[in-house]
Amino acid sequence: MHPPRSRDRRCLIEPDHPQLSVAQQCRLLGLPRSTYDYRPVAVSSEELALMEAIDRQYLDTPWYGSRQMTAALRRRGWPVNRKRIQRLMRKMGLQAIAPGPHTSRKQPQHPVYPYLLRDHPPRAPNDAWAADITFVPMPIGFMYLVAIIDWHSRFVLAWELSNTLDTAFCLEALDTALQRFGMPGIFNTDQGTQFTSEAFTNRLKTAEVAISMDGRGRVYDNIFVERLWRSVKYELVYLHEFREVLDLLKGLETYFEYFNHRRPNQGLDEATPAEVYGLA
């Protein structure tokens, strides 16, 4: 048995429990009250609407850098300049996946590893895993979502939410995946600072997992995670107004269970990720 994740323990809290306060429930579950009280990153309603417009455009055209994104939004009636779009894309953790000028999230002090999947394409479950982070809008702000998937089967192995774009929630997802599903041969990410950090790469090295990173400007290096984000956004996030983080957590839990076990995948000959991964 693996210890329950803080995300799972948050979902056990009953705000309207007739006998136990939220603080008492947190103590019983060994959950810091501050962890339960996660709040979305607060922004103005106008800025949040613009960030959602950027996100929707990015899902359709992930090769757009700030210049093309600015032009596309202006055509849709947004009176924006490139500097503002650069700032918001940086805040959202977005960068174009095509050659050309764009804002990079790369940390110059962190080492970058070669892209390994070109010469070692995954042919079976656990040959390679991939991870990425996306922006999740809410009516009063936004959160960040990280997911780790099995490349061959598209099975979502682990995921976590955070209101900061840091390394800690990525490490929690990585630890969950390693504890529950063993070790992949290769672990692929982009060159974001969370994944190039010493803490993250050392965890992979300790597990003797080969580290792979997308080449800058290569559209298809992490394509299956990009497709996952499109599904999550259009099939869940943009169909519901999750006003509370706990509701978003429960919605994502339900969606990923559906995605893994009940949603046929065209790229898998209409099988589910769980069937291909071997868990059906």
Image: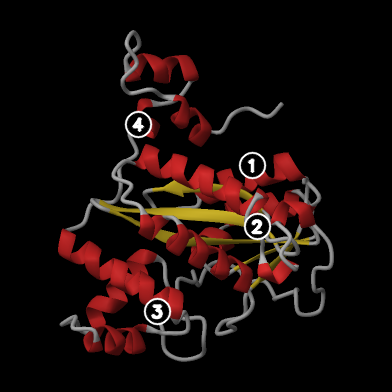
Residue placed furthest toward the top: 19
Q: Amino acid at mark 2?
A: Ile
- Per the image, label 1 sits on a secondary structure element best described as helix
Badge 2 crowding class, 10 Å Cα cut-off, few under 14, some 14 to 19, many 20 or more, is many
Q: Earlier in the sequence, mark 3 or mark 2?
A: 3
Q: Which mark is residue 44?
A: none
Q: Which residue is mark 1?
A: 176
Proximity of marks 2 and 1: CB atoms separated by less than 8 Å: no
Identify the residue shown where x is 59% and y is 83%.
Answer: 218
Quadrant of the snapshot with the N terminus: top right
Mark 3 or mark 2, whichever is nearer to me: 2
Identify the residue shown where x is 28% and y is 90%.
Answer: 71
Residue 150: x, y in percent?
A: 71, 58
Identify the residue shown where x is 80% and y is 74%.
Answer: 121
Q: Earlier in the sequence, mark 1 or mark 4?
A: 4
- Per the image, label 2 sits on a secondary structure element best described as strand
Colour scheme in the image?
secondary structure
Q: Which residue is mark 2?
A: 149
Q: Amino acid at mark 4?
A: Ser
3D distance between C-alphas at marks 2 and 4: 29 Å
3D distance between C-alphas at marks 1 and 4: 21 Å
3D distance between C-alphas at marks 4 and 3: 32 Å
Badge 4 crowding class, 10 Å Cα cut-off, few under 14, some 14 to 19, many 20 or more, is few
Q: Which mark is residue 103?
A: 3
* Vertical placement of residue 162 versus 114, above or below: above
Q: Nearer the viewer, residue 58 or 30?
A: 58
Q: Amino acid at mark 3?
A: Thr
3D distance between C-alphas at marks 1 and 3: 31 Å
Quarter of the image holding residue 153?
Answer: bottom right
Q: Amino acid at mark 1?
A: Thr
Residue 220: x, y in percent?
A: 62, 80
Q: Which residue is mark 4?
A: 34
